[in-house]
Amino acid sequence: MKKIKNKKPDQITAIFFLAPSLIGFSIFFLIPFIVSIYYSLVDSPINGTFCGLTNYTQLLSNPIFLRAGFNTLVFTGISVPLIMAISLGLAILLNNSIYGRNIFRAFFISPLVIPVASVVLIWQIIFSYSGSLNSILSVFGLTPVDWMDTNWARLVVLVVYLWKNAGYSMVLFLAGLQNIPVQYYESAYIDGATSWRCFKSITLVYLTPTSFFVFIISIVNSFKVFRETYLIAGSYPHESIYILQHYMNNMFSSLDYQKLTSAALIMAVCIVALVSFLFKFERKISRSIQ
């Protein structure tokens, strides 16, 4: 009984300190989420009647929504492996004693502290039809490209995403690399292991938790690319970069709350399912390593 009585003050203290966060979470996340579920199940936000899954079935048969979902999947499928490979390569390079590595670290981290709006102006200057990149192409006798009005737009958004997030992922991988004991590599080299063998059997194995975290963060950040895309190309960009957030933003502008909330919930369910699967997969890998 004494143990139970001693725990009560600690529980009350914990609740007291957690209360502001819980209240803020409830006001800004939990309650709006519940309201959005309600909106997705009625035919009108004002005096609406229950319509079941009608909004969802209509949404899943909407070609614009399907196109936005497909573009989102394609972009995530391309950008996440690319940023993991690039950031890991940069981390391995900067983990060695090379000249000016501290300068390079600061250089790759700088996109995280630069305001997005100011950077977008630079990207517009570079990739507009009369911009600096087309001026360089014309010098070499090449035909100018309308970068944001053709399928090249996806490449532009991919470059912006990599530029924005590669530095953060690199720092995470760099921290993981510096936690690997040097003795493991020394023992492996003494036993005649090659650099590739050390990378595959030591570096990748011990970077598993870090790689998993970077993978999750990269997926989340790939959904945040809407901000840069919107600022560069507007509400209705080229169809190759029209993603789910564009669709939801346009539904919000037209006050179509049923489609907006239905699309948001579908995306939320897909993200939660994907992350849950990845956590389960990571636990299996961790057990096999141990």
Image (tube, rainbow, N blue to C red):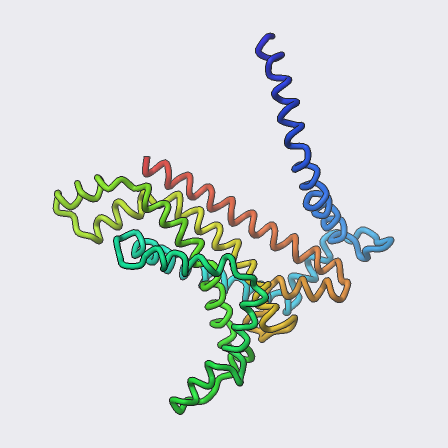
* Residue drawn at x 46%, y 46% as measured from the top left: 278
Q: In screen coordinates, is 171 left or right of 96?
A: right
User: How many numbered markers are drawn?
Assistant: 0
Quadrant of the image occupied by residue 183: top left
Q: Point out the residue furthest to the bottom here.
A: 141
Residue 221 appears in the figure: yes
- Residue 20, how many percent across, how many down? 68, 36
Image quadrant holding the C terminus, namely top left
- Residue 201, how many percent across, how many down? 25, 46
Location of residue 6 with respect to 31 vertically, above or below: above
Q: In screen coordinates, is 195 left or right of 1?
A: left
Q: In screen coordinates, is 39 left or right of 171?
A: right
Q: Point out the residue furthest to the top here.
A: 1
Nearest to the observer: residue 197 or residue 142: 142
Location of residue 286 with respect to 135 vertically, above or below: above
* Residue drawn at x 30%, y 57% as measured from the top left: 93
Nearest to the observer: residue 268 or residue 27: 27
Residue 67 appears in the figure: no
Q: Point out the residue furthest to the right here.
A: 47
Image quadrant holding the N terminus, namely top right
Location of residue 256 with respect to 211 vertically, above or below: below
Location of residue 184 with respect to 137 vertically, above or below: above
- Residue 84, how many percent across, how many down? 40, 56
* Residue drawn at x 33%, y 41% as measured from the top left: 179
